[in-house]
Each structure stands twice: as structure tokens, then as C-alpha cells.
Amino acid sequence: MANDKHLRCSFCGKSKDSVRKFISGPSVYICNECIALCNEILAEDEEREVAEAITQVPTPAEIKDILDQYVIGQERAKKTLAVAVYSHYKRINSQSGRDNDVELEKSNILLIGPTGVGKTLLAQTLARVLDVPFTIADATTLTEAGYVGEDLENIL
């Protein structure tokens, strides 16, 4: 085509010959440099959205109220989980550089109890409310490496 020499990026105006890659669409053209710039803009937006989502963590009282809607009883477990989840997100936010003078220690929770008391329901509800992934695995077949059974890595 004779017009190929005169093609220019629809965004920055650079000619096809002055860029490494040139992608054409129906009546529009974009160069690799503009694509890289667009990718950077999108990545920054995504980081900002994630940061905003983390800062909008409900208070422990709000988390407990949500758990109250799904789980009957287990008041101590609901309060403990609500405070632990809130503290976890507060710790994540403080690590992002906003509150460097605040140091929150990491903690874990182990839910123990007989079948049917709501351990899984509590965890599933928290995951749904906070929009985080949740998985259930049968741990009875897992052992330390070198023993008969599956390795812990098989859960992932």
C-alpha cells in the first residue's frame, strides 16, 4: 500500500516508521509506546482501586452485625473474628506507608469445635463480606513431608 508510509498513531501522531510496533484497527492506529502508556495508566488505576477497597473495611461492630445475620449464637467467636479481621486490615493499611509510626503484630485464629457449630459458616461469611477468596480442604490426609500422606502444598 502506498498509504502505509503516511500512517500515524491516532494517539501521539508518530509515524509508523518511527515506532517499534504499530497496531491498526478499523480507521484507528496505535503504537507500542502509547500501548505501554495506557497499560501504566490502567495499572495505576487498579492499584488505587485496591487501596481504596482496603481502606473501606467495616468496623468490628459492623462485621459482628453482619455475622449476626448469618450465624446464631457463637457470640465470643463472632466478636473475636470481627476484631481480628479489622486488626488485620488495619495492619495491611499501616504497612502501605501511611502510618509508619503504628506497629501492629500479626495474629492468627484457630476455630475449634464440634461439627455443626458454625466454624465454616463464619469463615465463609467473612470471606463473602470482605470479598476475599475462600477454600475448603480436607486436612485429614495431610502430613509433614516424608510421611505417608499428601503434602500441605496440595491444598493450594
Image (cartoon, grey):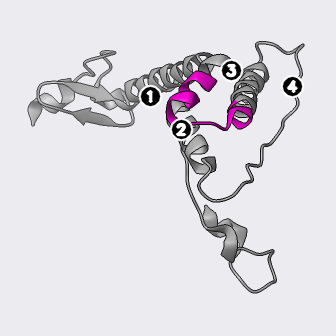
Cα distance between the residues tagged 4 and 1: 35 Å
Q: Image check: 113 left or right of 65?
A: right
Q: For the residues labelled 2 and 1, say whether their Cβ atoms are less than 8 Å apart.
A: no
Label 1: which residue? 39
Q: Earlier in the sequence, mark 4 or mark 1?
A: 1
Marks 4 and 1: which is nearer the front?
4
Are the residues tagged 2 and 4 within 8 Å (C-beta)?
no
Sequence order check, earlier mark of 2 and 1: 1
In the image, farthest residue toward the bottom:
148
Question: Quick check: 24 above or below 8?
Answer: below
Q: Which amino acid, mark 3?
A: Pro
Q: Residues within 10 Å of mark 1 (few under 14, many from 20)?
A: few
Residue 104 is marked as: 4
Q: Residue at x 66, y 18 (%)?
A: 61
Q: First in sequence, mark 2 or 4: give its number.
A: 4
Q: Is residue 75 magenta?
A: yes
Q: What is the distance, in whole Å, between disc 1 and disc 3 at their CAs?
A: 37 Å
Residue 135, relative to residue 59: is it above or below? below
**In the figure, residue 116 lies in which quadrant?**
bottom right
Which amino acid, mark 2?
Thr
- The amino acid beneath tag 1 is Asn
Dominant SS of magenta comes to helix
Residue designated by label 3: 60
Q: Under tag 4, what secondary structure?
A: loop
Give left or right: position of 49 versus 6: right
Q: Which residue sits at x=67%, y=68%?
A: 139
Pick the quarter of the image with the N terminus.
top left
Q: Which mark is residue 125?
A: 2
On the question of residue 128 being in view, the answer is yes
Task: Say few, some or many: other residues with alpha carbon within 10 Å of mark 3 (under 14 / 14 to 19 / 20 or more).
Answer: some
